[in-house]
Amino acid sequence: MRGGGPTRVGDLLGSVLKQRGVDKQLRRVGALDAWADAVGEKIASVTNAKVVVASTLFVEVRSSAWLMELDFMKAALLEHVNERLEQDGAIERIVLTLMEGDGSNPPTPITSER
């Protein structure tokens, strides 16, 4: 311990998270909370932002019609989400999956990739 005294864990945590790259990923996960506000009430009512893996946001969509519609809007949706995140925590890609049943199951691996 430098300086002769103990260091509080809370004081060290920020630098440890930054060194490991975890702080950036935590900011990216904020996209889950930002989704509804970013896309608006109508789109939020037919989608569910499920998970962020690395810099990719996975979103479930209630119907194939909405999946196709939102596929055309991915660039704008990505921009709206990133406007609500810190710059170095940006999402780079959105993957849309078709929601199974009531949405309580894991995403179906039907994706719309470009």
Image: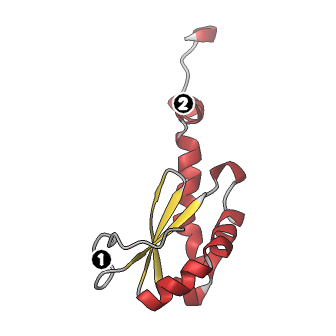
Quarter of the image where the N terminus is located: top right
Viewer-proximal residue, 1 or 113? 113
Instruction: Give coordinates of residue 24: x percent, y percent.
Output: 59, 45
The residue at the point 47 percent across, 73 percent down is 112
Disc 2 residue type (three-letter):
Val
- Quadrant (top left/top right/bottom left/bottom right) for the C terminus: bottom right
In the image, residue 102 sits, relative to residue 81, either above or below, namely below
Whole-percent x, y for residue 110 in the image? 36, 73
- In the depicted view, which residue is nearer to us: 33 or 105? 105
Would you place residue 70 above or below residue 33 in this image? Answer: below
Left or right: residue 19 versus residue 48 is right
Looking at the image, residue 100 sits to the left or right of residue 40; the answer is left
Q: Residues within 10 Å of mark 1 (few under 14, many from 20)?
A: few
Residue sitting at x 27%, y 74%: 105
Q: Which mark is residue 96?
A: none
The residue tagged with tag 1: helix, strand or loop? loop
Q: Residue at x 54, y 17 (%)?
A: 6
The residue under label 2 is 16
- Visible in this render: residue 111? yes
Whether residue 75 is situated above or below residue 70 in the rendered picture: above
Q: Quadrant of residue 62?
A: bottom left
User: Which residue is the site of mark 1?
Assistant: 104
Q: Is the C-beta separation of discs 1 and 2 under 8 Å?
A: no
Residue at image point 55% right, 86% down = 69
- Mark before the other along the chain sequence, 1 or 2: 2
Q: Position of residue 87 (x, y in %)?
A: 71, 53
**Which residue is more in the foreground, 91 or 34?**
91
Q: Nearer the viewer, residue 74 or 10?
A: 74
